[in-house]
Amino acid sequence: MSDPTHDEPAGSTGIDDALERLEVLVASDPSKANARYNLGLALASKGEWDRSLEEFRAALKLKPSLLEARINISGILLQKGDYDGAIEASLKALEFNPNLIEGCINVGIAFVHKGMPEQAIDSFRKALAINPDSVAAHINLGNVYLLLGKVAKSVEHNLEAVRIKPDFAMAHNNLAVSLQESGDSQGAKQHAKMALDLGYPVDPGFLKQIGLQ
């Protein structure tokens, strides 16, 4: 989640202090859409999903063009397991801006959780049509294709993710898994080690499988 405004930045005094200031600001004037949005961000950072949703929805009511609020609502609904709600929120944001890549990604993730991989692939491909270098889209496509047993496609997208962002530990981990499934044990070891070096908690069972533990 990101902050598109400058009404009340979090600053360096800690999230609790920022949260307290934002609550005071909103209490003094509940009609400030940006302040309510930022309060939603602060609450989300503490995992207070229900209160965060309330603030994002209040911000949207005051400022319907605040697409970041719609995307954050979608993200929280994903966290809560409300996949239909997440899809609805993202599609509404995409009505305002069809090039909102986060909306496509969230829709795709929700479809994965709903057991609808083909629809998920369509959404992630829409994200790539907007930005061919979207690491999130490549990572998610790699996961879905692996789920479907399309290992070569999984390797292809995970390789792209690593090419675009060489220091992304998760991408190396996912590439290692798909390479192992493709029969490239040496490549799997190489990228699993890179994931470890970058701080990713690679599954111990997988490390044992490929001979790194």
Image (tube, rainbow, N blue to C red):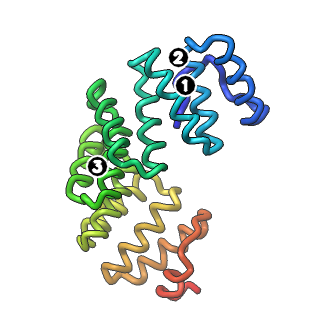
Q: CA distance from mark 3 to mark 2?
A: 31 Å
Identify which residue is drawn at 63% across, 34% down: 42
Identify which residue is drawn at 55% across, 18% down: 34
Q: Is residue 16 left or right of 4 when viewed as pictured? A: right
> Are discs 2 and 1 less than 8 Å apart at CB?
yes
Looking at the image, tell me whether mark 3 or mark 2 is earlier in sequence order: 2
**78 in relation to 9, above or below:** below
Q: Position of residue 87 (x, y in %)?
A: 32, 42
Q: Which amino acid type corresponds to the residue marked 2 in the rendered image? A: Ala
Q: CA distance from mark 1 to mark 3?
A: 27 Å
Identify which residue is drawn at 52% across, 37% down: 1
Looking at the image, tell me whether mark 1 or mark 3 is earlier in sequence order: 1
Identify which residue is drawn at 59% across, 26% down: 38
**21 in relation to 178, above or below:** above
Q: Which amino acid type corresponds to the residue marked 1 in the rendered image? A: Tyr
Splitting the image into 4 quarters, where does residue 75 fall? top left
Q: Which residue is mark 1?
A: 37
**205 in relation to 196, above or below:** below
Numbered label tally: 3
Quick one: label 1, few (<14), some, or many (20+) residues within 10 Å? many
Q: Is residue 51 left or right of 186 when viewed as pictured? A: right
Q: Which residue is mark 2?
A: 33
The mark lying in front, picked from 3 and 2, is: 2
Secondary structure under the numbered disc 2 in the rendered image: helix
Q: Which residue is mark 3?
A: 124
Secondary structure under the numbered disc 3 in the rendered image: helix
Q: Which amino acid type corresponds to the residue marked 3 in the rendered image? A: Phe
Q: Position of residue 161 (x, y in %)?
A: 39, 56
Q: Which mark is residue 206?
A: none
Q: Position of residue 206 (x, y in %)?
A: 49, 81
